[in-house]
Each structure stands twice: as structure tokens, then as C-alpha cells.
Amino acid sequence: MSKYQTIRTVRVEIEKLNHQIDLKIIQGASYRREALRHKLLRSQLSRLVPQRSSWFGKSLSLISVFL
């Protein structure tokens, strides 16, 4: 599986888990197991997708400090 397909699969799985967690919250049921899985998938996704920190973004944050 390519990196792009892996990222897409993880995102789809996170969306499914979000839906399951929402339903369990509405029902008043425990969603601890789903929350742990969600946390694992989010960490996996953060390792796969590099953080975008461009020069422009950094300079804007620096300028905003002085305004």
C-alpha cells in the first residue's frame, strides 16, 4: 500500500470512529475503547503526514507578535 493510500485509509477509519463515538455519546455508553483507537490512529497519521511549516507562515506568526 502506498503512503497516500495509507493516509487515506487512516483518515476514513478516523471518520468512522468519530461517528461511532458520537453515537455512543448520544446513547450514554462508554466509548473508551474507540477513544484509544482514535488516539492511536491520530498518532499514526501525524507520523505519516509531515507538518507544513513554510517560511511565509513562520514570518506571519513573527509579525503578529509585534502588532
Image (cartoon, grey):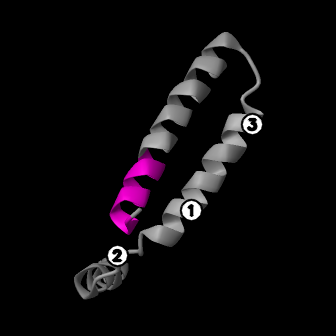
Residue 64 percent location from the top left of the image: 31, 77
Q: Which mark is residue 52?
A: 2
What secondary structure is found at the residue carrying circle 3?
helix
Identify the residue position indicated by label 3 in the image.
33
Amino acid bearing label 3: Arg
Instruction: Name the residue furthest front.
Output: 1
Amino acid bearing label 2: Arg
Q: CA distance from mark 2 to mark 1?
A: 17 Å
Q: CA distance from mark 2 to mark 3?
A: 31 Å
What secondary structure is found at the residue carrying circle 1?
helix
Identify the residue position indicated by label 1 in the image.
44
Could you tell whether 16 is left or right of 26 in the image?
left
Q: Is residue 3 magenta?
A: yes
Q: Which residues are magenta?
A: 2-11
- In primary-sequence order, the first of circles 2 and 3 is 3
- In primary-sequence order, the first of circles 3 and 1 is 3
Residue 33 percent location from the top left of the image: 75, 36
Q: Is residue 25 magenta?
A: no
Q: Quadrant of the C terminus?
A: bottom left
Viewer-nearest of discs 2 and 3 = 3
Q: Residues within 10 Å of mark 3 (few under 14, many from 20)?
A: few
Seen from the viewer's position, the closer of residues 14 and 67 is 14
